[in-house]
Image (cartoon, rainbow, N blue to C red):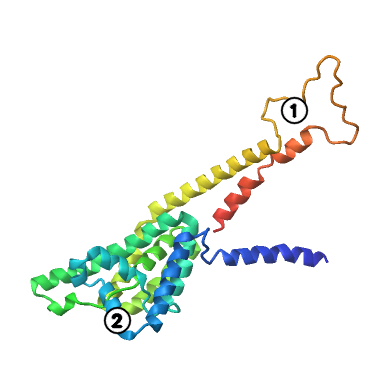
Amino acid sequence: MHHTRQAEPTAGVTARGLLRLLPTPTGTPFTFGYVLVLLATSLFAAYAPPATVDALLRGSSTDMAHLARTPLLSLVTSALWVAGGVLSTSAIGFLFVLTALERRIGPLRTGAVFLAGHVLTTLATELPVGISVAAGHLPATSLHRFDYGISFGLMASVGALAGLLAPAVRWSLLTVVAFTLGQALLAFVDPLTAWGHPLALCFGVASWPLVRRWRAARIRAAGAGSAGTEVSGAEAAGTAPPGTPSTPVASAGTPGPPAASAGSPGPAGPIAESEQPLGNTSALHGIESA
């Protein structure tokens, strides 16, 4: 029986820790909503007529020709598709990386990191192509590339997340990712994409000072919110503020409160219990362990 009682809370904590790796509508709304969009477009790409899918993908491509005509539309729509489908490495990495990043810096800032990586890396790889074509160093066909997906934003998010992890985990993650990207560079199958991924990773690493400030601000805000919750809970329980008499003063002719008998709790008993700062400690521990 003793071992069973010890195992139950441990199993509960482990289950909660595993669930925190996945996006939820309330905990990580940006990642959760984005995953639903990617799931919908992937299912459409798998089951819609091939000609329709091909036309949509070509219209969403961020090649130089589309960027010159409809830059905003191309940048947005190209990030709505996953190259390789929902079981690809990019899709699985997106699920876990953005969930972890959003739990640390919040939904809006996570979206900003992802979008900045996607836009900046796309422009950094495509604008030189346009300049080279204009200068006559590349043929005009280079303006029409088939380029879409979430990989640039994902790599920037990986780089940003690494700055919020413990040093051993941080450098292990960056080493594995850099080795994988190096292999793609050596293969030289798609040069622009192969160079774009390490560039996006560098954009994410460059954001470390910013994301660390965001992380610290989020921790402070959560701590202040927990402190406010404790004060509200104490007021609801009838706990008097410091310096306020805990028992009413008996008027003339009115019997006062009965004296506490030996061994019975005095008026300070419930107040002392309600003043224990359990909420603040647990909230901060949950955030630090994210």
Q: Position of residue 193 (x, y in %)?
A: 29, 74
- Residue 124 lies in quadrant: bottom left
Residue at 36 percent across and 70 percent down: it is: 80
Q: Position of residue 136 (x, y in %)?
A: 8, 74
Tag 2 secondary structure: helix
Q: In the figure, 111 relative to 188: above or below?
A: above
Question: What residue type is disc 2 on?
Answer: Asp
Q: Position of residue 270 (x, y in %)?
A: 76, 38
- Residue 48 lies in quadrant: bottom left
Asked whether residue 263 is in view, the answer is: yes
Q: In the figure, 132 relative to 49: above or below?
A: above
Mark 1 / mark 2, whichever is N-terminal: 2
Residue extending furthest toward the right: 262
Q: Is residue 284 left or right of residue 129?
A: right
Question: What residue type is disc 1 on?
Answer: Ser
Residue at 64 percent across and 66 percent down: it is: 14
Give the quadrant of the N terminus: bottom right
Tag 1 secondary structure: loop
Residue at 29 percent across and 63 percent down: it is: 119
Q: Residues within 10 Å of mark 1 (few under 14, many from 20)?
A: some
- Residue 202 lies in quadrant: bottom left
* Depth check, front residue: 230 or 39: 39
Q: CA distance from mark 1 to mark 2?
A: 75 Å
Q: Which residue is mark 2?
A: 54
Q: Position of residue 289 (x, y in %)?
A: 56, 57
Query: Which numbered dot is residue 44?
Result: none
Query: Which numbered dot is residue 246?
Result: 1
Q: Is residue 177 left or right of residue 255?
A: left
The mark closer to the camera, 1 or 2, is: 2
